[in-house]
Amino acid sequence: MLSRTADNLFWFARYVERADNIARILEAANRLSAMPITYSGATNEWESAVAATGTLPAFRAVNAEANSESVLNFLAFSPTNPSSIKSCIETARFNARAVRTALTAVMWESINGAWLDLRRVDGKNMKRSALDDFLSRVKEASLRLDGAAYRTMLRSEAYYFFVLGVMLERADNTARILDVKYHLLLPEGAEVGGGLDYFQWTSILRTVSAQTAYHWVYRQSVKPWLVADLLVLKQEMPRSLAACYDAIRETLDLLGHEYGRQGPAQRMARTMRTRLANANIGDVFQSGLHEFLTEFLVENARLGEAIAAQYLS
Amino acid sequence: MPSAFDEMTVAPGVCRPGYEGVQKWLADTPREVLELRRAEAELLFRRTGITFAVYGEADAEERIIPFDIIPRILTKTEWDKLALGLSQRVRAINAFLADLYGKAEIMKAGIIPADLIHRNPYFRPEMVGLRVPHDIRVMIAGIDIVRTDDEHFYVLEDNVRTPSGVSYMLENREVMMRLMPDLFAESRVAPVENYADDLLATLKSVAPPSAPNDPTIALLTPGPFNSAYYEHSFLADRLGIELVEGRDLLVNDDAVYMRTTRGPQRIDVLYRRIDDDFLDPLTFRPDSALGVPGLIAAARAGKITLANAVGTGIADDKAVYTYIPDVIRFYLGEEPILKNVPTWRCREPDALTYVLEHIQDLVVKEVSGSGGYGMLIGPAASSATRAEFAEKLKARPDDFIAQPTLALSTVPTFVDSGIAPRHVDLRPFVLSGADKVRVVPGGLTRVALRAGSLVVNSSQGGGTKDTWVVNG
């Protein structure tokens, strides 16, 4: 397979996954912002939504204030923000179009359909109900694409690069959501795990569609360290860093097997997966969740570079 | 304008041979059903994403070419003669190109003026003396044919650089077979779907002698912004070859490789859909970001076959076109089976005088223009436009040719006002391999959708039809 084709597949998957995550973050922000201030805390939920996507500097460069209007516009519709939902879907479709023949017909129809659909949406003065509808359509598009890939793609290199894109992006987004919420949501001086931030932690779970999963796994009320445990270390939780890295390691091994050659990417993935498998959440909190997640994001990006160097260029 | 020859209807209710099934189908099918079929066809085209771009139109990145659901029909007898003529013409063009970039005997014999060749921008002096594998330069040709009556087919234009449109020929057929299986079943239409196999066999046959038995072939595209990108990806898919861009390729020690996830992979034949000018920044336009530095050196070294070869544009130049009948006689010693449209070369003073006097009756074309741009249709133009064009002619007579406005044949077409005759042309595709020449029966029929219009180009409101070759 051409390196460029693999690169396009990889980024196609990443951008759709990113759009999905932004939609989830916006949903959570929208929900929290509707709560009385005593529940939602003193911090600006809209600003933390931007921070969770890792685009705060770019946002501040063009916006004086973070409020529902400026953030929605920036994260959902802005053509100048390359990570807005609109830009993500555009870029994803552009990548897909460049590798049409490597995709199955259903995959192409699903991304092309989403693109046609979202192109018609006018972001200006959007009503709350219209926003909810828009965000669920974005999430549906990514579900449809995931499903189409899962059900129709030949289990071969094209599929592997697609999965790598999804998982690397998903791990990145989960880590960011957790990190930013942990830091930004909590008002100055408030105790972690205190009554006030119950809603914040619940909102994290909601963002990643894990509320029910949490209660099934832990059978107790929402505790910060358990939320972190679920999203970082639980292999059963499909969005957790551990689960993402299970998939990344496995996929890279399949690729290495198909090509008859292992490389730095395989070694890095194995190391990171082992580290996640052996960690326990008490130790992570002891040395600092923020430090742990920061390091993870760096390593995750480094693996992306290693994959690019090994296969995509 | 004389009344045009209609390919279906001889008199009300009487049709020419081959059209019986279609005539009955049209008579039996209510307008609503035709409309439904047309809507279904459009949906199929949209779903598969068959699009093209029109240069110079913002926000027109992706449109679909209008498709007419009434087929255009040729009988096998008509087709066989046409195919012979096409094959003859392309064989002569290949001999001509070998000579132009070799011993140049045709100029020594005084058949073609040397300055017409040497001053032509499509002649590539860099290629003189360069041998190409199997001495074939035009592997893929699209010859534009028009018809004026029962007997006469004329060649309007040769396209021997990077002709496009074959994907529409193939997709039109797919769509028609899905929409009208019954009509197909009773009409016994010669298949076209073997085009991809024929093209692959052709490309394999022209691999350099040093290439392995199963040579690696790739299709070079300018990328997704190109108007024909859909066709490029479609063909790569059908042939089972990689669709590469310039940045996917690298040249090392005069061999060409593509960057793959398994490392560099050697390419033996490159079906390139990029113009000469953009192929290699080291040889041609240094600002080209689409090409591959060193590609021409690799071709020179005989380590890769470019299909088509560099410099073939000299043979489809509109001024050179006028000499093709002589070219056929010179190299093959045969009389041309297909006629040229009578053409005045404005570079010749007598011809120029005639053209200026009769500009209201003529079609004047810029020799380097294509796609219907840079041309004047005398009878349809205003007198101001004609005067303007006459000035251009006087200033640069070498750049123009003129032809009579032919009464192009018409075929019934389903338009807003119902079923009405519209002018058509035909682009069959001719494949020249080291082993043989292959022509799939049919081609792309283009139709001018506006009443009376003679311009069939998709960039100017033309549509397409499926083309059937049937027994008869």
Image: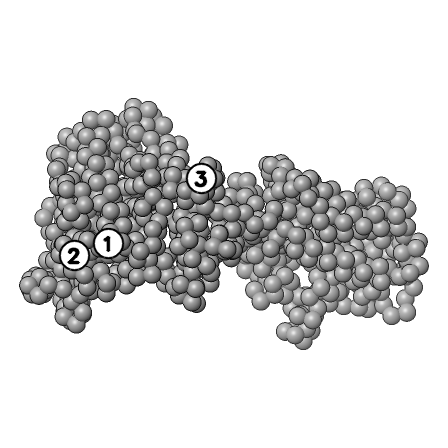
Q: Residue at x 42, y 67 (%)?
A: B286
Residue A42, position as x, y percentages in the image: 82, 68
Q: Are marks 3 and 2 on the same chain?
A: yes
Q: Which one is in front in this view, the residue at disc 3 or the one at disc 2?
A: 2
Q: Tell me the SS state at disc 3.
A: helix
Q: Residue at the top extreme?
A: B186
Q: Earlier in the sequence, mark 3 or mark 1?
A: 1
Residue A284, quarter of the rendered image: bottom right
Residue A294, position as x, y percentages in the image: 80, 62
Q: Which one is in front in this view, the residue at disc 3 or the one at disc 1?
A: 1
Q: Residue at x 51, y 47 (%)?
A: B266
- The amino acid marked with disc number 3 is Leu
Chain at tag 3: B
Q: Residue at x 44, y 54 (%)?
A: B298
Disc 2 to disc 1, how far (Cα)? Answer: 9 Å
Which of the labelled discs sits on residue B103, or is there none? 1
Q: Nearer the viewer, residue B133 or B22?
A: B133
For the residues labelled 2 and 1, say whether their Cβ atoms are less than 8 Å apart: yes
Q: Earlier in the sequence, mark 2 or mark 1?
A: 1
Q: Nearer the viewer, residue A143 or A203?
A: A143
Q: Tell me the SS state at disc 2.
A: helix
Which residue position holds label 3? B239
Which residue position holds label 2? B108
Q: Are marks 3 and 1 on the same chain?
A: yes
- The amino acid marked with disc number 1 is Lys
For the residues labelled 3 and 2, say whether their Cβ atoms are less than 8 Å apart: no
In the displayed structure image, the side of residue B453 where residue A302 appears, left or right? right
Q: Earlier in the sequence, mark 3 or mark 2?
A: 2
- The amino acid marked with disc number 2 is Lys
Q: Tell me the SS state at disc 1.
A: loop
Residue B279, position as x, y percentages in the image: 41, 58
